[in-house]
């Protein structure tokens, strides 16, 4: 059972790492990419951080989560990322959620919900399928207003 101080400590850590993910997202926006950022952490050590690179790389799979998962696996020296937490500014899509299952991510912490493509609870519930052989603990809504605002401003500027 968590003591109140443990819960407060975890909330503070969640915000700290989400702020780093938001910085990655801002960098993506400056590069003309959809502003999504991701950070992968194990035991207070950042294994990887990334932003969307789909346009830059001409790669539809280069979502921030996918780029970070690849880098984290290299840094970790294993395709299984047990004991890690993935922080991302928006609810992951089905591709990214599936990759998190394959990588055996322990925890997902994300900012804003994605009502048009989120695969954690908005459109799909990939992690909850009864046949999935791995469970991911999820914390949502961390700095959600900041993440949503960044996305909203990005798309408003393009209309």
Image (cartoon, rainbow, N blue to C red):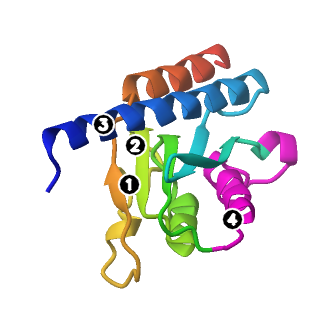
Q: Main secondary structure of the magenta part?
A: helix
The answer to whether 68 is drawn above or below residue 102 in the figure is: above
Residue drawn at the location 41% of the way across and 46% of the way down: 109
User: Residue 65 magenta-drawn?
Assistant: yes
Dot placed on the residue nearer the N-terminal end, 3 or 1: 3
In this rendering, the answer to whether 72 lies above or below 13 is below
Name the secondary structure under disc 1: loop
Vertical relation: 35 (above or below) 78? above
Could you classify mark 2 by the number of other residues whose Cα lies within 10 Å: few (under 14), some (14-19), or many (20 or more)? Answer: few
Q: Which is more N-terminal, label 3 or label 4?
A: 3
Residue 137 x, y percent position in the rendering: 33, 60
Q: Nearer the viewer, mark 4 or mark 3?
A: 3
**Label 2 – label 1 distance at C-alpha:** 6 Å
First reached walking from the N terminus: tag 2 or tag 3: 3
| Residue 123 tag number | 1
Q: Is residue 50 left or right of residue 144?
A: right
Q: Residue 115: which numbered mark, if any? A: 2
Disc 4 from disc 3: Cα separation: 27 Å
Mark 4 highlights which residue?
Answer: 73
Q: Position of residue 32 (x, y in %)?
A: 76, 27
Q: Nearer the viewer, residue 118 or 52?
A: 52
Tell me the residue that label 3 is attached to: 9
Is there any visible trace of residue 109 in the rendered image? yes
Q: Is residue 4 left or right of residue 159?
A: left
Q: x and y percent of residue 116 in the render?
A: 45, 45
Give the mark nearest the N terminus, 4 or 2.
Answer: 4
Decide whether residue 27 is among the magenta residues: no
Residue at (60% x, 23% y) in the render: 155
Start-end of magenta stretch? 55-79
Mark 1 and mark 4: Cα distance apart in space: 28 Å
């Amino acid at each position: 059972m968590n003591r109140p101080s443990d819960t407060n400590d975890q909330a503070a850590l969640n915000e700290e790492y989400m702020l780093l993910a938001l910085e990655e997202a801002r960098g993506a926006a400056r590069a003309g990419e959809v502003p999504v950022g991701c950070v992968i952490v194990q035991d207070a050590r950042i294994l990887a951080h990334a932003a969307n690179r789909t346009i830059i790389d001409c790669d539809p799979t280069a979502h921030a989560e996918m780029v970070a998962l690849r880098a984290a696996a290299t840094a970790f020296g294993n395709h299984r990322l047990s004991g890690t937490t993935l922080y991302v500014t928006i609810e992951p899509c089905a591709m990214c959620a599936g990759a998190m299952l394959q990588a055996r991510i322990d925890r997902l912490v994300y900012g804003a919900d994605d009502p048009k493509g989120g695969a954690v609870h908005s459109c799909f519930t990939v992690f909850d399928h009864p046949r999935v052989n791995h469970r991911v603990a999820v914390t949502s809504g961390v700095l959600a207003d900041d993440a949503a605002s960044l996305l909203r401003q990005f798309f408003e500027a393009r209309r």
